[in-house]
Image (spheres, grey):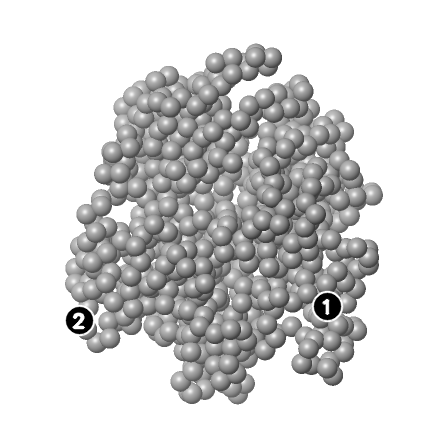
Amino acid sequence: MNNVTVIRTDTQSVVAKIAVGKEPQSVALSPDGRYAYVANAADGTLSVIKVTSQDPNRFAASLDPQSVLTTGAEPRSVVVSPDGRRVFVANSSQDTITWIDAKSNAILGTFDLRSSACNNPDHERHFQPGALAVTEDSRYLLVTRYLSFTSQGGVQRNDMGKEGVVCRLSVDTLSTSGARLSNPVVVRMAPQNSGFLDQKGNVTYAFPNQLQSIVVHGNAAYLPNVAASPSGPLYYQTDTQAFVNAVGNVEGNPSDGGEINLHLGGRVPEQGKQELYFANPDAIAFTTRDDGGYAYVASGGSDILVKLQVQSNGGLAFTVNDTTTRYIDLDNPDSPATSGANAGKNPIGLVINAIGNTAYVLNYVSRNVSVVDLDTDKVVKVIPTADLPTPGSEAEKVLVGAELFFSSRGNFVNPSGIGSSRDRMSEKGRQSCASCHPRGLTDGVIWQFNTGPRKTLAINGTFNPRNMLDQRIIDASAIFDELQDADFNTRNVSGPGPLPAPLPCVVTPGYPTITQSTIDPEHGLVIGQWHDFAEAPCVMTPFSVPNAGRPQPTVMLADSTVEVPALDAMREWQHYGIRTPNRAMTKQELAARGGDPSGGVDDTDIAQGRQMYQRAGCSNCHSSGKWSASTKNFMSPPPASDIETEAASTGANQSQFMFQYLKNINSYSLNAVGSGNAIDGYPAIGGIEIDSAGLKALGYDFNGDGKGSGYSISSILGTYNLQPYYHNGACETLGCVVSDTNHRDAGLSGQMDPIVDEHAKMVLIKFLESVDANTDPF
């Protein structure tokens, strides 16, 4: 499916499919319509499509084989300046922007974001550009930092601890000089009041995060994003928010323009509609070029198009009142226009035509485009862009897994019509697995989980890509042993958790006396009996009752006759559907492929760093294709002798954990304020070690039995793109990690530490930054 689909808008039909590079992520058109530029993330290339006939009756376009440009690793955004002179590409893993002459399609130069003022105050941080936009006067280029980092004085696991960043660069589209991206101006977007209260009635704040989209409209820029509120305790109403942030006066002195939280507009639905919230806002588009009119936001998790008013000053407002805004359900199984083959699942892209009356919504999972009449706010047609997998195939299982991973709702087969077979993935569509694990990776947030401060773990390192039977132990404190245990998060984090009073339930084998339970029958993917949504199972545990293979809802894709078990499908997607981001290209690779070598890393440094990695004993803990020595070596459930808890008398968290899978590197309370466990030269930003009830967090042997200290060994597969580091976010850079002498000593077994100078440290960091799925493991 590595192609671009061309749709004729008067007939709403596909007129061409043009093959491009691997994993196309972004497309931009030249103002005259003669060229389309496609950023191919997995290839590190930009494909240039030449349109030779724009006549809709004789449309013709093809890939120019001489204009496939290597720009850098993981290009995820491409834009064309409104004057048509320049093309800009954001290379996420490379930390660069490539700029191109649109007339000759020649690369003019590379801007290094990491070492620029855009990345102040810490150039060790991975900027990871997420999205680009050019102002209407073609004078400025805006680039987002994809993940948020701690602000000055901020700490992890705190609503107020992080900030989003947009950097504005001055552009001279008439110059070919390499210095013509210049004068960085950084706009820092602060946490904002979410409008929701926590369970104790306290105001909560959220910071903008996952900045993968930015659109300039008038003199402002708008950024739909998944905002994070991690202070906890985790609560489905406050964990993640659906922000659209703004940067004002982008052509003058740009500044933080605040936000609107789309979730607030879902509290009271319009008459005849159900209460739904708008998880994972992925794209925004406007009906007019100037202020006024409407904006529409694609909610990738909830399969919804959200409508907003655009005020005369550029502000956004709900269409009805402070609690109600209009939405268009793209995946309503009760409507023929949006069900079956017409369902729009996981909308991630959005454009509106020039006269502002039609929206085209790209749906990633359902592989189609929903056409929405904006005069009536209704879906009027759905255009397939790619075939769905063969029924019964492994590819079908993986796609169903992707559907559920990205969905905050979920629609399941229910022959009896009894019980809740919809919206089981969260409470009223508030969040999906992908809200915290974008693309199966990490949102970079340290959350206040039940067991303590915990970073969202990237799932790409769960399985060895060279041996899919090789699985690491999941969760930092080894409190789970199966991927299916994630259903506890679906129920207790994204959902409302246990019922206030027990109900009759389906008896679980081995527990015949338990006939009532507080397990919620309306949420989650473990159910009491196949095709029966009326009663929940009586028992769910992390260890003693395996959750793999239990009765679960099923999904049937459009035009398929096969019911795919939902929880099993999610495991298959995590097995096969998550791609580790590619490492930064070297100078030598860029030069060999016709790119600009100035934006590359040095392969000599990587080679020397690989040797240093082994000499320093890093491979003793971070080995095999999953780059972790943590290995599940038993069939669930684990032996009872492997399971422990801390004594209640110690005041510690009482969750069970598998003690044999913990490795102690003295990282408990690492770099937390006042902990006495600091890393020299780096700020105290680590999350403090308390659990959601205020008890001592897991990770330390409080009762002195030798069984509680440490954490499950994390994977470093693709680690450069997966910051911050450690369970509590103690480090935001690999330089900080390598400076942790306790960590280094843990792999040496009494040998002399080879990291004796800055050069040794530098090359080790360069190797760590280079570890991806193509790196030969130890």
Q: Amino acid at mark 1?
A: Gly
Which circle marks residue 752 in the picture? 2
Residue 527 image point, x, y percent: 70, 65
Mark 1 sits on what residue?
Answer: 528
Q: Residues within 10 Å of mark 1 (few under 14, many from 20)?
A: many
Label 2: element kind = loop
The picture quadrant where one finds residue 184 is top left
Number of callouts: 2
The picture quadrant where one finds residue 670 is bottom left
Q: Nearer the viewer, residue 117 or 141?
A: 141
Q: Residue at x 48, y 77 (%)?
A: 658
Q: Nearer the viewer, residue 114 or 411?
A: 411
Relative placement, left or right, of 683 versus 529 is left
In 3D space, how far apart are the residues under numbered discs 1 and 2 (Cα atoms)? 57 Å
Residue 454 image point, x, y percent: 48, 65
Q: Amino acid at mark 2?
A: Met
Q: Residue at x 61, y 75 (%)?
A: 545
Q: Nearer the viewer, residue 647 or 44?
A: 44
Q: Nearer the viewer, residue 48 or 132?
A: 48
Q: Is residue 739 above or below residue 596?
A: below
